[in-house]
Image: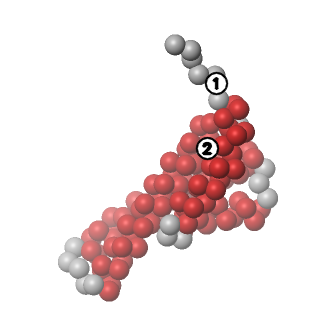
Amino acid sequence: MKRSVLTRYRVMAYVTGVLLVALTIGMIGKYALKVDGAADFTQVVSIAHGWLYVLYLVFAFDLGSKLKWPVKKQIWVLLAGTIPTAAFFVERRISRELGSPVAADAPAPAKA
């Protein structure tokens, strides 16, 4: 497996996670704290999160299919983008699991 497959997944996991946390904070501001402008903020962030979550699903599924993950693991990784902060923990765990095999595929560093 190429390193770029893991990198794409990691980037989208962080982006999805940050947007979901921002959306959660916006919803708290909108409904619990009645903050002015929170409705516009949540609308923009929810649209961005929705579209980028679809991209996250594509990249996570690509990673899982290349690694031949069991269905339960694949579903957990795919759903991590819907639970605030879960994407960060799942991404970290996946990166640690794949750290050695992916590093073995990487080209050797150039000598100075």
Residue depicted at 73% across the width and 44% down the height: 66
Q: Residue furthest bottom?
A: 32
Above or below for 91 versus 41: above
| Residue pictured at 77% horizontal, 54% vertical | 69
Query: In the image, what residue occupies the spot 27% across and 84% down?
Result: 33
**Badge 1 is on which residue?**
107
Residue 58, numbered label:
none
Q: Which residue is mark 2?
A: 6
The residue carrying pointer 1 sits among few (fewer than 14), some (14 to 19) or many (20 or more) residues within 10 Å by Cα, namely few
Q: Is residue 78 above or below residue 84?
A: above
> Relative to residue 1, is residue 10 drawn left or right?
left
Q: Does residue 52 appear anywhere in the picture?
A: no
Q: Secondary structure at mark 2?
A: helix
Q: Position of residue 16 (x, y in %)?
A: 48, 59
Q: Secondary structure at mark 1?
A: loop
Task: Examine the image and state in which quarter residue 54 appears.
Answer: bottom right
Q: Position of residue 107 (x, y in %)?
A: 64, 24
Residue 50 placement, left or right of 9: left
Q: Position of residue 50 (x, y in %)?
A: 46, 63
In primary-sequence order, the first of circles 2 and 1 is 2
